Image (cartoon, helix red, strand yellow):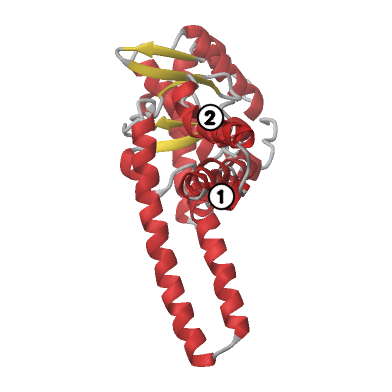
Amino acid sequence: MTEDRDGERLVHLITPEGADLLFPLASVGERAIAFGVDFIFSQLILILFVLIALATTAITASIQVFALMLIGVFVIRQGYFLFFEARLQGSTPGKRFLGLRVVSRDGARLSMESIIARNVMRDLELFLPLAFSSAPEQLIGPAPWYLRVPALLWVTLLVAMPFLTRERTRAGDLIAGTIVVRAPKTALVADEAIGQRSKIRFTKEQLTVYGEHELETLADLLRKLDSNRATDDDLRVVAGAIARRVRYEGREAVQQPALFLRAFYAEQRAELERELVLGRRVADKTERPQAKPQP
């Protein structure tokens, strides 16, 4: 669901924990600039690879090396966006430069299937229109006008989709179930639960349920709380979901949900930092074991 506020279009994302997160949508211009930056970077990598491959081919004069060069060109062209969006949680160097990020429309963690789907469609959305506009006869041959017109309309529709859809999505986003948002440039929520840790404590097993993705989601909710954009019902829903998931037996999740969430955030963050120091990075709850009941 989208809404316009203060001249900016915002999108609501409901996370699996029930939190309603609000992000500003990336503009078409921002997405175009980000893609331009990424295209330049990918072409520089491609040129460097081709030069090295050509030098190797000249030295060895091997047809196998030339074949590998063609495969490498394809992998770099297709793999640039796949690699960075998978490794940087929906970002690429160009998107990071503009402060943009690809997120899942359902609020869940961005899956590899979605990343692949939205990037495979780029050839159909961008390179096919470019080829059609520069040399239409190479694509459809000497076809009559009644075949050229539908082809031209189809290409125009693909290019114009970000301008026509309310969420500024292209065809790849519609298929993958993703949208591009402007990531908030805010620091992590301050640890305000330090003074309350004597009242609300969590066991080691309870803190080994969630990962970095869930902690980031909780941080977004606490930011909304600090800016008076989170209701008591929102806090109770999320606090209750976390308490059930980690099997917390106290009543604080119902009676003092804000206090419970801040305390859980503080200890969960400390736990993940300890894991990271030990060389164990936990991306999300799928990499965590199920919590055991409290003794």
Q: Amino acid at mark 2?
A: Leu
User: Tag 1, which secondary structure?
Assistant: helix
Q: Which mark is residue 157?
A: 2
- The crowd level at tag 2 (other Cα within 10 Å; few <14, some 14-19, many 20+) is some
Residue that badge 1 annotates: 137
Quadrant of res 42: bottom left
Q: Amino acid at mark 1?
A: Glu
Task: Kindly check if marks 2 and 1 are in contact, taking CB atoms under 8 A apart as contact.
Answer: no
Q: Earlier in the sequence, mark 2 or mark 1?
A: 1
User: Tag 2, which secondary structure?
Assistant: helix
Q: CA distance from mark 2 to mark 1?
A: 20 Å
| Residue 221 placement (x, y as % from top left) | 45, 22
| Residue 72 placement (x, y as % from top left) | 55, 68
Asked if residue 269 is positioned above or below residue 279 in the image, the reply reads: above
Front of the two marks 2 and 1? 1
Relative depth, front residue between 29 and 188: 29
Q: Say which residue appears at 46% left-offset and 30% top-offset.
A: 265
Q: Say which residue appears at 52% left-offset and 8% top-offset.
A: 233
Quadrant of res 155: top right
- The crowd level at tag 1 (other Cα within 10 Å; few <14, some 14-19, many 20+) is few
Asked if residue 171 is positioned above or below residue 15 in the image, the reply reads: below
Q: Say which residue appears at 40% left-offset and 71% top-offset.
A: 48
Asked if residue 260 is positioned above or below residue 129 in the image, the reply reads: above
Q: Which mark is residue 60?
A: none
